[in-house]
Every structure is written in C-alpha cells, then in structure tokens.
Image (cartoon, rainbow, N blue to C red):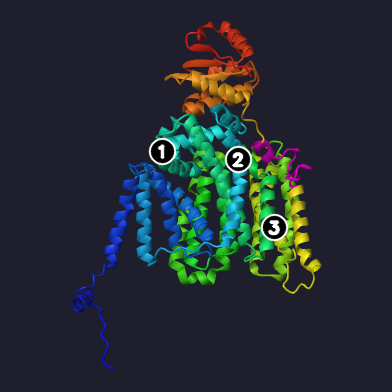
C-alpha cells in the first residue's frame, strides 16, 4: 500500500487540488463575526427593527451555554444570565458616551459573545425542542395570559391608571424607569442629574429592573419613538406583566427540575398544583401593589436555588451563572442577598474539592462578585440610610404572610423529609434551601420584635421568598402520588393513580380558591388577589384614575410651577398628585409638596401652601377642597400672588 500523504499546510493541499476553494482560517471567521456583531445592530436600528436584537443576543448566549438538558433550560438560563450581566454592565452604560443606545449595547454584547466563543472554542449549538419543554411554557402562558386580561381590556388611559393606582408604588417605578432611560444609566451614579428627575428616595434605590426595562424599551422605541406620558404608562404596564411572566416560568421550571425526570401524570399534577398556588397566594399581589423589582429579585433567587439544588455539569458555567444571579439580586432587590449568598456559600463548601480544579475561575468570579453584588446595598445603606425601613409598618396582609408561612411550611417540609430519606441528594439540598428561606423571614421578624414592633413590611418580603421556594418544594408531595404501572392486571388498579391525582388536584385547587366554592386559605379576604386584579373594573375607572387622566389631558406641566391635585380626602389628593407628576415627568419638582407626613385636612393643604417656595398651581377636583383652599388663602392673602387655583370638577 502506498504511503498516505497528510497535509498540515493548507497551501500544500491547494497546490495538489487547485479546484478546491482555499480554506478560511479561524481568525478570518473571527473577524467576520466581529464585523457582523456591529453591522447587524447598525443595520436594524435605522430600519426600526432593533426589537430583533434582544432575541438575537438571547439565542446567541443560549447557543454558547452547555448546561441543562433541554432547550427550555438553555433559553431560561441564558435569559437570567443576561439579566444579571446587564445589571452589572449598567455601570459601564452609565459612564460611556452612548448610554442605552441599542446599537452600542447590542454591538458590545454580540462582540463579547464572539470573543467568548473564540476563547472557549465553543460553537453555537442548541438542544432540539422536547415535549418536556412544552408543559411549563404552556402553563406560564396560560397563567400570565389570565393575569394580563384586565390590562388587555383597559383600552383607555384612565382604565390603565385605575389598575396601576391599586398600588401607588407603580407611579414611582414608572418615574424611575423614565429617569434611567433619560439619564442613560443608573441614577445613583449621577445623583445631581437624578435629583432633577425623581424624588430623593429613589436616587439610591436598587435600579437593576429599571435599567433592564429601560434598555429593552429603547430597542422597542426605535420604531415608535421615545414614549412619554400615556405611552410610557402602557409600556411600563406590559413590562411589569412580562416580569411576572418570567417569575411564573421560573417557578414552573424549578418545580419540574427539582425531582428530575417525571412520569407524565406527576408532571401534569405538579403543573396544576404550582399554578393554583401561584394564583391562590400572595404572588399576584406583587403585580397589583407595584413591586417589579421584588418580582425580578425573586425570579433570580428561585433560579439560584434551583442551580444550588441541581447544579450544572460544568463547574465553570455553574460559577458564572451563580455569580450573575447573585449580582442581579444585589442590583434588583438586595434584601434577598443574604439568603442567596448563604445558599451559594453552602454550594461552594459542598463542592470545594471539585472547585480546586478550576481555582483560577473560582478566584476571578469570586472577586468580581464580591465587588459587584453588594454595591447597591452599600450605596443604599451608606448613602441613603435605607436600613431605617426594616421596621416599616405592614398592612393587613401581614396575616396572610403568617398563613403562608405556617400553612405551607409544615406540609412541604414533611414531603421533603420523606423524599430526602429515600431518594437522591437534591431533596436534601432543597430541604436546606427552604429552611434557609424560612429562617431568613423569621430572623427579620425577630429583629422587628427586638425593636419593639410587630413583624412588619420586610418580614412579608422574606415570606414571599419562602413562599416561592415552598411552591417549588410541593414537587416532593406530588412525587409521592402513585403512577400507573405496566404490571397492573386490572382496570381498577390502573385507575387508582388517576383517581389519586384527580383528588389531589381538586383539593389544592379548591383550597386555593380557584373553584369559586370558597376563598383561598392563603389570603384573608374571600376575594383572592388574583380575583381582585382580574375582576377589577376598567370600564368604570376609579376616581383617582379619572382625576389624574383629566388633569393630564387638560393641564400640561408649566415650567417653574409646581402642580398639585387637591381632592376631598387628603390621601386621595396625594395619590392623584403622584400619578400626575409621574405622567408629566415632574416627580422631583413636586416632592416637597406631595410627600408630607400628614393626610388630615385642612392641615395637609395648609402644609402644602407652606412647603411650596415658588409658584404653585392647585388643581382642585372637589367643591369641598375648593372651599378649603379659599378659606386658607383668605387667611393668608400674601400667598395669592404665587398660588393659582384651577377648578377641575370631575364627576364620578
């Protein structure tokens, strides 16, 4: 046999076979990819197609990951990785000259992904879709679609305002998203500029959700222009619903991931049970009350717990994802940083021997995370004095927090203990995760008690984390249900698992108040938070919404003049004023006359007149408020020169 020739030089191969096209060297592919990383964003932006860039970045990121078995694993992990990375990259966006411009941000992201692919030698690859991916996605679409119904029905500005007015925090978050978008980065890095845009309380508030939302919104604005007022309001509402959707999908994904491969019967029951617990607990209240930052923080925390319970195969990828999630939690809702950090520390200790093989990656990731993750916490505590809020009073929902904690914890822990004694270590790890979350909530309650107050507002926030992880933990109970066996010799024996599953589903759905026979055991009122939201009337908006809408349409902001709405009740006028200032982008200018500690009238109106140090416009929405203002101005005629009273009677 003649000796075979091998060619190590591409030019030698070309000389033997001149018709063969010359090979493209690896560095040429790299140059082509780097050029495309900027040419694609630069081409889509003027064509008003920049909205395609975030999905492109998501797919590119998912294609470079190797953890996870299914397509859903890859896409969800990639999305959460990008959220964490974006919150950290926001520090760069805040100081470079392009701000949140889609071309600059997407070009930088695609460039980074290209360089990572070149450095690691990974080529884009995605798992094939599986039927196992379909159930969590369909369930999430169903739950979120149901929660989106009132927003879809609200075809008017007043109708949308009526929904957002259910939680006054919505208007502050709306103002902060707009401010971050205008500033092109984090407000706390430009406090002087931020104070011209938002109230002082928000300058050092954790802004990871707001920056991520403003960044994604900038990609949509390439086609619609910069939203303001009513348009910005609509965008904000959809982003809040999308954030809740990400949390719901993460809960379904984590619950299915915890037990590993499931029988289809178990998988179906688990999906229905998780959906019932989401809709029948306090979870929808996070949407109603206007807590988008907490929703995103919970999403990242649930995903982090899922990766601690069932780690990825590659330690390097696991470290990077845990670091991104921990950083994202720090930038979005740093209250959850202590329990999340404790979970990561536990995983590091448990895998210390394996991590010695990737010690350089470990040290690098640990150093970066140690600097970035606590940064917003330090900014808020040292610069904003936000530790004072730990004793903030809770509303009547405090009883619901105890119901969730004391009702779900014993039941779920029992199932986890049973599974931990007879199955693999994932159950033991999730048992520890739940204990950490419950212990964190109780620790906050203890701090409140030691300070001489009842367990308060942030105790409820800790319970929200515990509730989310307990919902994931119901997989342990579902796994105890029997499943059909191929060895069943009679129809009766084969029907037993189906009957047990039906009874379990009906019981949970009924106790969560979804059948209409009774209210949910996890809420105080007969009407659940889901029902309060979905059944809220948008055809006949609330008085607050109607007054705010009328004031926005009839009385545009006037430079150099502070505008306040007065109504019969002081608190109602307070909400209407916050709403109007958010729509007009004047929240910073109105802070001194809106955020007053007193709501009783006529003392509140008197304090508003005293607090204003310049021109003041009073939009009076009630005849009793008009008489109140006239009496006060009659007693202080010197104020008439700078106070304008505008009657604005709104029938309701």
Residue at mark 2: 287
As for residue 361 lying within the magenta part, the answer is no
Residue 614 vertical position relative to residue 129 in the rendered view, above or below: above
- Which label sits in the foreground, 1 or 2? 1
Q: Earlier in the sequence, mark 1 or mark 2?
A: 1
Residue at mark 3: 269
Dot 2 falls on a residue whose secondary structure is: helix
Q: Earlier in the sequence, mark 3 or mark 1?
A: 1
The residues bearing labels 2 and 3 have C-alpha atoms spaced at a distance of: 26 Å
Dot 1 falls on a residue whose secondary structure is: helix
Which residues fall within the magenta stretch? 511-534
- Which label sits in the foreground, 2 or 3? 3
Viewer-nearest residue: 421 or 240: 240
At which x and y percent is residue 122?
A: 40, 66
Q: Earlier in the sequence, mark 2 or mark 3?
A: 3
**Main secondary-structure element of the magenta-colored stretch:** loop
Position of residue 635 in the picture relative to residue 57 (left or right): right
User: What residue sits 53% from the left and 65% below the top?
Assistant: 69
Dot 3 falls on a residue whose secondary structure is: helix
The residues bearing labels 3 and 1 have C-alpha atoms spaced at a distance of: 41 Å
Q: Is residue 179 visible?
A: yes
Position of residue 485 in the picture relative to residue 60 (left or right): right
Q: What number is the disc on residue 221? A: 1
């Amino acid at each position: 046999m003649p000796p075979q020739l091998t060619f190590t030089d591409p030019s030698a191969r070309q000389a033997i076979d001149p018709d063969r096209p010359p090979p493209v060297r690896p560095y040429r592919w790299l140059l082509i990819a780097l050029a495309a990383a900027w040419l694609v964003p630069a081409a889509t932006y003027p064509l008003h197609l920049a909205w395609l860039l975030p999905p492109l970045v998501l797919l590119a990121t998912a294609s470079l990951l190797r953890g996870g078995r299914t397509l859903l694993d890859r896409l969800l992990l990639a999305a959460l990785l990008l959220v964490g990375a974006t919150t950290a990259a926001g520090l760069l966006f805040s100081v470079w000259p392009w701000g949140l411009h889609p071309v600059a941000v997407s070009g930088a992201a695609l460039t980074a992904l290209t360089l990572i692919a070149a450095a690691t030698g990974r080529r884009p690859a995605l798992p094939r879709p599986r039927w196992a991916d379909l159930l969590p996605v369909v369930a999430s679409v169903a739950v979120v679609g149901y929660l989106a119904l009132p927003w879809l029905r609200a075809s008017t500005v007043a109708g949308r305002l009526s929904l957002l007015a259910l939680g006054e925090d919505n208007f502050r978050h709306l103002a902060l998203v707009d401010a971050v978008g205008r500033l092109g980065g984090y407000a706390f890095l430009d406090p002087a500029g931020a104070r011209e845009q938002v109230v002082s309380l928000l300058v050092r508030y954790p802004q990871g959700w707001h920056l991520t939302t403003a960044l994604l919104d900038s990609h949509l604005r390439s086609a619609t222009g910069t939203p303001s007022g009513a348009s910005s309001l609509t965008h904000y509402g959809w982003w809040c619903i999308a954030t809740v959707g990400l949390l719901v999908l993460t809960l379904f994904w984590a619950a299915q991931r915890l037990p590993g491969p499931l029988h289809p019967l178990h998988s179906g029951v688990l999906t229905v049970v998780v959906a019932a617990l989401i809709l029948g607990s306090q979870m929808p209240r996070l949407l109603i009350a206007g807590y988008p930052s907490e929703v995103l923080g919970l999403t990242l925390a649930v995903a982090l717990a899922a990766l601690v319970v069932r780690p990825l195969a590659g330690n390097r990828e696991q470290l990077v994802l845990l670091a991104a999630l921990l950083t994202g939690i720090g930038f979005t809702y740093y209250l959850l940083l202590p329990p999340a950090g404790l979970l990561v520390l536990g995983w590091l200790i448990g895998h210390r021997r394996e991590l010695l093989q990737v010690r350089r990656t470990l040290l690098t990731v640990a150093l970066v995370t140690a600097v970035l993750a606590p940064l917003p916490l330090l900014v808020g505590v040292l610069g904003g004095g936000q530790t004072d809020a730990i004793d903030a009073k809770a509303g009547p929902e405090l009883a619901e927090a105890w119901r969730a904690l004391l009702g779900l914890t014993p039941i779920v822990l029992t199932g986890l203990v049973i599974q931990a004694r007879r199955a693999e270590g994932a159950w033991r790890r999730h048992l520890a995760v739940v204990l950490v979350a419950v212990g964190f909530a109780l620790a906050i309650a203890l701090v409140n008690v030691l300070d001489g107050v009842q367990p308060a507002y942030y105790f409820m926030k800790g319970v929200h984390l515990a509730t989310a992880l307990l919902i994931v933990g119901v997989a342990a109970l579902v796994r105890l249900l029997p499943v059909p066996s191929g060895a069943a010799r009679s129809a009766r024996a084969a029907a037993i698992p189906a009957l047990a599953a039906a009874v379990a589903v009906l019981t949970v759905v009924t106790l969560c108040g979804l059948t209409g026979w009774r209210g949910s055991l996890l809420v105080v009122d007969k009407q659940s938070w889901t029902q309060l939201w979905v059944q809220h009337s948008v055809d006949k908006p609330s008085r607050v919404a109607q007054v705010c809408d009328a004031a926005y349409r009839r009385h545009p902001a006037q430079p150099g003049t502070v505008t306040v709405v007065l109504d019969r009740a002081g608190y109602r006028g307070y909400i209407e004023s916050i709403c109007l200032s958010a729509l007009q982008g004047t929240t910073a200018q109105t802070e001194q006359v809106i955020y007053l500690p007193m709501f009783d009238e006529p003392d509140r109106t008197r304090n508003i007149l005293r607090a204003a140090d310049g021109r003041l416009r009073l939009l009076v929405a009630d005849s009793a408020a008009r008489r109140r203002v006239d009496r006060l101005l009659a007693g202080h005629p010197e104020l008439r020169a700078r106070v304008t009273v505008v009657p604005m009677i709104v029938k309701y």
